[in-house]
Amino acid sequence: MVKVKVEFLGGLDVVFDKQRTYDLDIPSEGEFTVKDLLDYLVTNMIKNPKDVEMFIEDGTVRPGIITLINDADWELEGELEYVIEDGDIVSFTSTLHGG
Amino acid sequence: MTTFKCKRCKETDATLKSRKELFCDACFIKFVSMKQRKLMMVDEFYRDHFKVLYGKDLVDDGKSKILVPFDFSSSSLSALDVLLGLLKEQNMQHRGRVGFTLELLTVFKSDEDRINIENMWKELRSSPLYDESAWGFVNYHMVNANNFFESAKELQHIVLHDQDFTTKAIEWRNESDGEYSIQTLLDRCPNRNTRNDMWIFIVKHIVKKFTYQQENIKVILWCQSMTKMADQIIGLVVKGRGAQIASSLDSENADAEYGDRFKNLYPLKNTLLSQLDAYCIIRGLDKYTLNYEVKSDLFLNATDTDTSDTKTKNIRLVKNMTINELARKYFDDIEGEYSNIISTVLRTGDKLKPPKIETSSTDNHHGSSKCAICLNTIYDDPAEWLRNIAVNRGHPVETEEEQSYYDQWKASKIGLQNEEYLTLRNHAWDNGNDIDLCYGCTINLNGIKTKELVWPKNDSEELQSVLAEYEL
Amino acid sequence: MSWAPPSDPINNKNKPVKISQLCELCHCRKAILKRPKNLQKVCKECFFYVFETEIHNTIVTNNLFHPGEKVAVGASGGKDSTVLAHIMKLLNERYNYGLDITLLSVDEGIVGYRDDSLATVKRNQKQYGLPLEIVSFKELYNWTMDEIVATAGIRNSCTYCGVFRRQSLDRGAQKLGIHHVITGHNADDMAETVLMNILRGDVARLEKSTSIITQSSGSPIKRSKPFKYSYQKEIVLYAHYKKLDYFSTECTYAPEAFRGTARELMKNLEAVRPSCIIDIIHSGENLVLKDSEQPFKKAASANTTSTSKNTFVDGNRCERCNYLSSNKICKACMLLEGLEKNRAAITLERDSSVDGAARVMRTLEHLSF
């Protein structure tokens, strides 16, 4: 079981039932990576399969969406391989919406 | 199945469709070769170099030679095919006289490359497509890319200042500093993109240097398709080299970077890559390609499974592609119906001229305004430009904890690596010469971890140093 | 609509920082982002410092303002203009620019989009203590965007909206006696425009696409873009870390299809070469047309005219609305005429400023990626 807070910002909440913040308890054994988290989000939390491409491209977060792990750019944290710890906050912010 | 007639001859059944027009094989070959021939005769200078001339019109005693960089792609194979066709025609019409001879040049990276190239060349030479007399007007040369460093009279170590983006060069001695090869250089590039940039430049330099050293070669005939040239234009824009677009397309003026010895001609610039691929397939040249995959997209009988096959091959991770490949992908995604985008890009490029050279207010050392790496003219001061838009100072240390981190950093391997760089930098700043880089090369160098590279000192002496070549 | 700031992390307070994770500028705090401009890893404090200072540098190097100048920040409630309002207030105080800043918003009349974003602007007004002026399409033209789309269709919505919004900002500023509107156009927008103008061969706009100051021909109102060299990603992160209150919902009417393809290409390029945005701008600043290709100045009545390169002043007024225009009838009035007369689709062909090559754009309208 891993406890993680997920936030969808910059308009990305529309893909996730118009809710910005989720406190998730995800059942897992062993290491739970950001890659696992993305799989979980896609399988369990995107209602409309057509919306998946607004979030995921080529097996990773779509270009134009900023991913932060505890407020740090995920590029600095190992991206998909980062192992999530209890209490981590992962946020996804779309930059694609109008300025 | 319904058949359509060729739009040109209106007799034969059409076999392919290009830019919404239906062609039969024969008309298509004529169509593609006429486009190339037309550009080879675009002005008096080029006409005189390709036509058979007599008497006082004779240029260079009738020994005009054309250099063709040859890489066994569909573009170079089809260009050669058209040239051989023209030679054959001239030979017949003028009883053994032709207007020009061809010097083909291939640049290779490794022994393995060399063997593959030699074998393929032999196969092409013995191809039933051409009779022996045609080859009498063709010489084939090969140059090892390592000549780039090996033939250089003097190597210099170029160091970029990590704070203010200026550059200095110090001498590099093979004896004490170690051998420097193409592989050393490519291994140090941070990504495929920079590697590709460096490789393209090295090949281009070798081709031009080779041409510079030959007598009587006044024309380099580059085999780039319109598609490839459009990729390159977008590539230049994306790499901050927009100022170079005009000179990269210039076929009117002699190449000033190489002592005005020759002009660069791009006779395939009105032909799409897909058209050249189709040309090769019809002529049976597709079996002579190396490291190149010919696509049969234009043919009417190309079955659906074929296209879906090539589509799946096209899907590559965007992250692993180079800038030029991404531009190509963009064009590929729209080329089918929207091929006019490619020609629009090229036409736009043709409308540009080099910008005015802005003299920098801050430094006065500017003797030359050529980039020490890519040899292109420098139009602005990239260091100053970068300093203005990217601040390189941070927020001061504030707490004890931060001070302790700072101390740890200084003592660490990263800190030491930084020391190593700083030592080199200080050495270069104490003993080196000022050199100028263009914006694109400054950015490339900044992307290399150690912010330094070794490069031939490019001056007239370097151009004289002889390239070792193989002639087949 | 309410707004809640993003959550603060709770996990990394006590964790020791590895040396390799330290900021590359101060070497004493944990890096939290890699700057796309130069790939530097920086901490939050250094990020704030460089982000703000670079904008200040842009303002100073380009002499954007003079002391005592009255300026209007074009405020949409979106991320760019929200950060712009915040930064302008901050820099104005830090460096004593002596500017008199007003927020200026346009209400295009798009239900479910603009009404919500205007609520954000009204909150910004209070948060920053700046005066706010709102001008509306309805009030100026007697048409809302919703009505325009219902009449002319969705295809050209961006053309109408662009023309009307530009004029509305001018009129709003003039009403307040302000001659300078600053907008939140960022480096990404600018790079995208350069790329798009090359792809569609829009030669008339190519040279000026990177001008930091532009002025409609004969107009007393100039526009500038202090974010010319600021990355969208950094603007969004700045808003995130500073917990700025911004609105982010896509406009109901999707952007022009061709711009969409250019945007997609840009995002792919950026993934491979993060610096490409400033690289493209650097290129754009160096694209110069051959003398023979200089478009006739009249034909090039694309709205922007670079003040430094092109001193085209004629001071004509539109015969209909008496507003400044380089043509007999201003663009807005031409569009209005089409709307009124036909109540049907007016096509781009009527728009005299769109040259032949831009026709490509139309054939591409329906292209999707």
Image (cartoon, grey):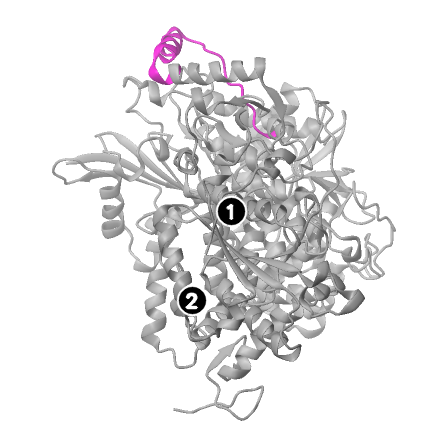
* Figure check: B3 above or below C345: below
Q: Position of residue B247 (x, y in %)?
A: 67, 49
* Figure check: C247 above or below C15: below
Q: Quadrant of the C terminus of chain B?
A: bottom left
Dot 2 lies on which element? Answer: helix
Q: From the viewer's perspective, is B108 left or right of A6?
A: right
Give the residue at x 62% y 74%: B96
Q: Residues within 10 Å of mark 2 (few under 14, many from 20)?
A: some
Q: Quadrant of the N terminus of chain B?
A: bottom left
Front-most of B197 and B84? B84
Disc 1: host chain = B
Dot 1 lies on which element? Answer: helix
Residue B391 included in the magenta stretch of the image: yes
Query: Do circles 2 and 1 both sit on a common chain?
Result: yes
Question: Mark 2 sits on what residue?
Answer: B124
Q: Position of residue A74 (x, y in %)?
A: 35, 34
Disc 2: host chain = B
Q: Which residues are magenta?
A: B389-415
Front-most of C103 and C221? C221
The answer to whether any part of residue A49 appears in the image is: yes
Snapshot quadrant of residue C326: bottom right
Amino acid at the residue labelled 1:
Val
Question: Mark 1 sits on what residue?
Answer: B203
